[in-house]
């Protein structure tokens, strides 16, 4: 990962709580892992899931008995971030069109 924490305190600030099988669980570096995997442009859910889990395991212990539950939770968070990103881009495009329309009105 390109943006590794400089110290334990920095790593602690990068913990996000996620529901894993009904238990609120802190996962270190989840947002960074999601961002990194999202930047790879993968479309196959299985490969995305594997890449996410592989990256999360660098900073967070995943018990073998709970591996599927963690993978489901991590993938759910990835999808949520993906939806927010798409909505954010759509909102930016709408604003850009509104601004362009106002600029054109001002030129006439």
Image (cartoon, grey):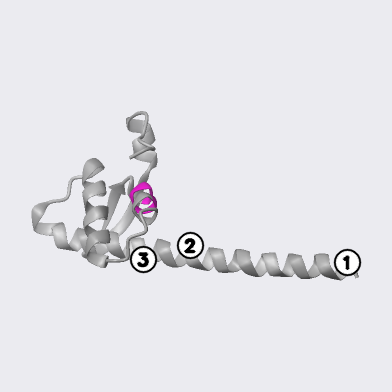
Extreme residue toward the left, this view: 65
Residue found 88% across the figure and 66% down from its top: 106
- Magenta stretch in the rendered image: 31-35
CA gap between label 1 and label 3 equals 41 Å
Provide residue 68's location: percent of width, then percent of height. Answer: 15, 62
For the question of whether residue 106 can be seen, the reply is yes
Provide the residue designation for mark 1.
Answer: 106
- Which badge, 2 or 3, is on the more N-terminal residue? 3
Label 1 element class:
helix
Which mark sits nearer the N-terminus, 2 or 1?
2
Residue at image position (91%, 70%) is 108
Residue 32 located within the stretch drawn in magenta: yes
Q: Is residue 63 left or right of residue 86?
A: left
The secondary element bearing badge 2 is classed as helix
Is 54 above or below relative to 83?
above
Residue drawn at point x = 21 percent, y = 58 percent: 70
The part of the image, by quadrant, that contains residue 19 is bottom left
Furthest toward the right, the residue is 108
Within 10 Å of disc 1 (Cα), the crowding (few <14, some 14-19, many 20+) is few
> Which label number is shown at residue 79?
3
Residue in the foreground of this view, choosing between 80 and 20: 80
Circle 2 sits on which residue?
Answer: 85
């Amino acid at each position: 990962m390109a943006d590794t924490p400089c110290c334990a305190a920095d790593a602690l600030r990068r913990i996000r709580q996620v529901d894993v099988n009904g238990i609120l669980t802190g996962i270190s570096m989840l947002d960074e892992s999601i961002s990194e995997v999202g930047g790879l442009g993968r479309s196959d859910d299985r490969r995305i899931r594997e890449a996410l889990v592989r990256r999360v395991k660098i900073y967070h212990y995943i018990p073998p008995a709970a591996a599927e539950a963690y993978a489901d939770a991590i993938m759910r968070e990835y999808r949520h971030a993906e939806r927010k990103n798409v909505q954010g881009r759509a909102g930016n495009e709408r604003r850009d069109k509104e601004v362009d329309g106002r600029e054109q009105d001002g030129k006439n």
